[in-house]
Image (cartoon, grey):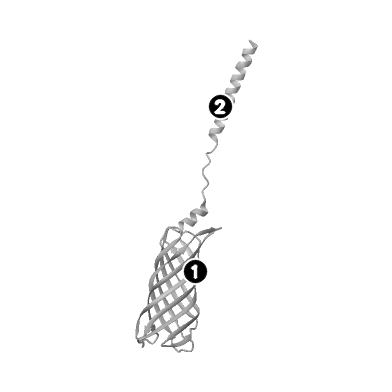
Amino acid sequence: MTQMTSLLHFAVFAAALSLTTSSASAQQPIQQPIEDPAGMRADAVNEGLRLSAGLQLGFAGEASIGGFDADLDPSFGVQGQVHFPIGRFFLLGGSLAFRSLKIDGADDRSNVFAVGPSFGGHYAIDVGPVVVDPFVLATIGLAVAFSNDLQTDTELGIDFGIRGGAHVWFTDRLGAYLAFGYQREDIFIDSERSSGWQLHTDIGVTFSL
């Protein structure tokens, strides 16, 4: 009889222990996969249409007009670009720019409008609180030049540029960029071929839609 009582007590204890363990296990929160906010933030800047606007500051260059070669003074300009990311590595869009140039020793400045397609590559990398997005872009299109006095006949020419730099994205919609580049124009003024090239620094802001 004593043995049966002991076995009964043991069975009741085992059942109670099993219920307690099952209840504790049921109350444990289910572990969810840990999300990577950094990776999500880097991916977000690859999704929307990009609108960029900024300054273009030239600091060294040369011009050739009718066989006469001369240095270019520092120049200034503005530039707007539109790009659409294609996958994680490529950008395709267009560029519109205005630049004001001056030949060393000249009294007047020459202005250049340039428009054309823009394309290149980039790769967004999460760096702490921001996303750094290095890029290389090339532009090739049409250019038209005229002097400030508007007394010079102007015809269309060719504009070519390449620049490399980086966007810094503070959010997935707002960023800033800094780049260094090379720009060249071959145009015709008064039926004479003129060309010029200049190194420049670009700085501006970018919005992703």
Q: Nearer the viewer, residue 160 or 101?
A: 160
In the displayed structure, 8 sits above or below 167; it is above
**Which amino acid type is marked by label 1?**
Gly
Residue at left offset 44%, top offset 77%: 184
Q: Position of residue 97 (x, y in %)?
A: 41, 74
Q: Secondary structure at mark 1?
A: strand
Lower sequence index among marks 2 and 1: 2
In the displayed structure, 10 sits above or below 90; it is above
Residue at label 1? Answer: 164
Hey, which residue is sitting farthest right in the picture?
Answer: 2
**Which amino acid type is marked by label 2?**
Leu
Instruction: Examine the image and state in which quarter residue 147 appears.
Output: bottom left
| Residue 19, disc | 2
In the displayed structure, 40 sits above or below 51; it is above
Q: Secondary structure at mark 2?
A: helix
Residue at left offset 48%, top offset 78%: 198
Neighbour tally class for label 1: few under 14, some 14-19, many 20 plus, Cα within 10 Å: some
Q: Position of residue 178 (x, y in %)?
A: 51, 69
